[in-house]
Image (cartoon, rainbow, N blue to C red):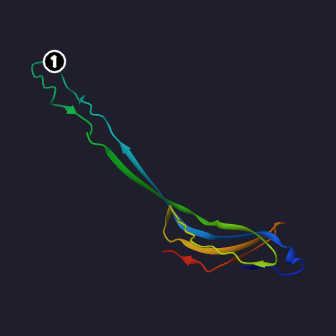
Amino acid sequence: MYSVAGPGASDFAGTLELGYQVGFPWSLGVGINFSYTTPNILLDDVSIAGPNINPLGSVITPNLFPGVSISSDLGNGPGIQEVATFSVDVEGSEGTVAVANAHGTVTGAAGGVLLRPFARLISKTGDSVTTYGEPWNMN
């Protein structure tokens, strides 16, 4: 619900924006690497001449099975990010907007996530007023 008061309030036109401030202290990046080496034979320090020929005595081969590695990077989070989830044009001195079945996801965050809802009324001339709700700790 929004309400505009004062001279010219009935002529108000602008945008009502709803959203969240999202804060998290750490960011997490994960990578998965896959590698495979075809079987090769390497003869290490082998002599093929002389009376004691043993070419298989120093055979070295790479792993025959694929290799997989997983890496993760933990870094500083972006701080507080503002995400506008809904925006609607409004006119008049007061009105109501309803939002239903809204869902969201925060990915790449490590540690606690803090959400703080906000509502912002922006006039066509660019003036704005923002109100914030109580923060939600999403641990």
Residue shown at 89% from the left, 77% from the top: 8
Residue shown at 64% from the left, 79% from the top: 133
Describe the element under mark 1 as helix, strand or loop: loop
Quarter occupied by residue 52:
top left
Residue 102 as seen in the image, left or right of residue 67: right
Quarter occupied by residue 7:
bottom right
Picture coordinates of residue 68, whole percent (x, y): 34, 48
Picture coordinates of residue 24, whole percent (x, y): 55, 68
Q: Looking at the rendering, in which quadrant would you find the N terminus?
A: bottom right
Residue 48 as seen in the image, left or right of residue 71: left
Label 1 Cα crowd, 10 Å radius (few <14 / some 14-19 / many 20+): few
Residue shown at 38% from the left, 52% from the top: 70
Q: Mark 1 — residue?
A: 49
Residue 77 as seen in the image, left or right of residue 130: left
**Is residue 30 placed above or below 129 in the rendered structure?**
above
Which of the pair 78/106 is nearer the observer?
A: 106
